[in-house]
Amino acid sequence: MLKHELNQLMFSDSGWGGSVEYKSVSGSLIYFHRTLGWRARKQKPMALSSTEAEYNALTESVQDLKWCKKLIYEATGMNCLEVLYCDSQSAISIASNPIYHHGTRHMNFRLHLIRQLVEDKTLLLKYIPTEKMLANSFTKNMPLSKNLSHLRKVFSLQELTSMGVCEN
């Protein structure tokens, strides 16, 4: 295992069956000193449970993490420890435990990429409470005031007028 000089953080979340077509939504946010990117999109495979929706979102997030890790290595020559935060303890359990789970036998094997990375110790999967999940803005319907407050935390935003952007 390589020595990790930097931490790259990813927050992954899903909203299960929240659309008209009952498709779940994946949301993710990637940090490397600052917010590098974010994504929200409908999941292609229909999830049969909230756990499966969260696991689908984790898989999409891992793919983004891998791409970003490669980009950071090419730019700096340094390796990053990938830390992925999730608010679903059941999804973390599936990823961390290679034992057969009867309730997940229908899930696509490509989703077990996460399990392999956890076993290889190249991915650290951590639980974060839902109220601290930074990807919630991309997957949950929240009141405007709560959403704006949440997005300020995500992007470390100041009032635009204090930055001189909105002056006339």
Image (cartoon, rainbow, N blue to C red):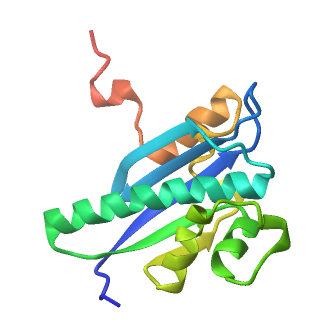
Judge whether residue 133 can be spotted in this image: no
Q: Quadrant of the N terminus?
A: bottom left
| Quarter assignment of residue 92 | bottom right
Q: Position of residue 135 (x, y in %)?
A: 57, 48
In the displayed structure, does residue 60 sit left or right of residue 100? left
| Quarter assignment of residue 30 | bottom left
Residue at (67% x, 83% y) in the render = 98
The front one of 160 and 115 is 115
In the displayed structure, does residue 49 sit left or right of residue 77? right
Residue at (56% x, 45% y) in the render = 27
Q: Quadrant of the C terminus?
A: top left
Residue at (58% x, 59% y) in the render = 58
User: Is 57 above or below relative to 94?
Assistant: above
Q: Position of residue 102 (x, y in %)?
A: 84, 72
All told, the count of numbered labels is: 0
Q: Position of residue 104 (x, y in %)?
A: 78, 66
